Image (cartoon, rainbow, N blue to C red):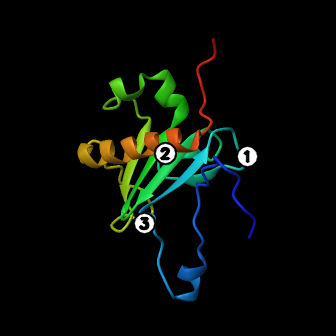
Amino acid sequence: MGKVPEGVNLDGESLVPLLKGTGSLQRQSVFWHFPGYLNDPVIRGRDHDFRTRPMSVVRKGDWKLHLFHEEWLLDGGRENVDTNNSIELYNIREDIGERNNLIAIDKRKRDELLDELFRWFEQTQAKLPTKEP
């Protein structure tokens, strides 16, 4: 394995111990980040255009939060999070198909995962969509 350049924050962890059955992951959360527009939508839940819009996801334990960047930016972000439809929250142990959005039911978990996702953006200097001038 190569050396990590100084000052670079790698967002990753070796899966070898997990695959060999000799260890576990050190991290508690896993992140997906699609800051652009992808092809080939995947039909799921309310979103028939999944994967075709900028979004980020955090998975922590049984919980998974989706942040849709366009809606977040255009509909008021955190200030309007209760009404802007920019976030989805699922307990994937109970709802593996992600059909029951719990965003209005568990606001504490929503805010916890949202805060963690924004900290990850800062730590990794993740590229984020912005409003057009």
Q: Residue at 70%, 44% (x, y): give it.
A: 38
> Badge 2: how crowded within 10 Å, few (<14), some, or many (20+)?
some
Are the two marked residues, 1 and 3, in contact with CB atoms closer than 8 angstroms?
no
Q: Depth check: give the residue in front, 59 or 105.
A: 59
In percent of width and height, residue 11 lies at: 58, 55
Q: Amino acid at mark 3?
A: Ile
- Quarter of the rendering containing residue 2: bottom right
Q: Amino acid at mark 1?
A: Asn
Q: Amino acid at mark 2?
A: Trp
Q: According to the image, label 1 marks what residue?
A: 39
Against 65, residue 128 (above or below) is above
- Quarter of the rendering containing residue 124: top right
Q: According to the image, label 3 marks what residue?
A: 96
Q: According to the image, label 2 marks what residue?
A: 120
Quarter of the picture holding the C terminus: top right
In percent of width and height, residue 65 lies at: 42, 49
Report the Cα–Cα distance between label 1 and label 3. 24 Å
**Which label belongs to residue 81?**
none
Residue reaching furthest to the top: 133
Report the Cα–Cα distance between label 2 and label 1. 25 Å
Q: Which comes before the other along the chain, label 1 or label 3?
A: 1
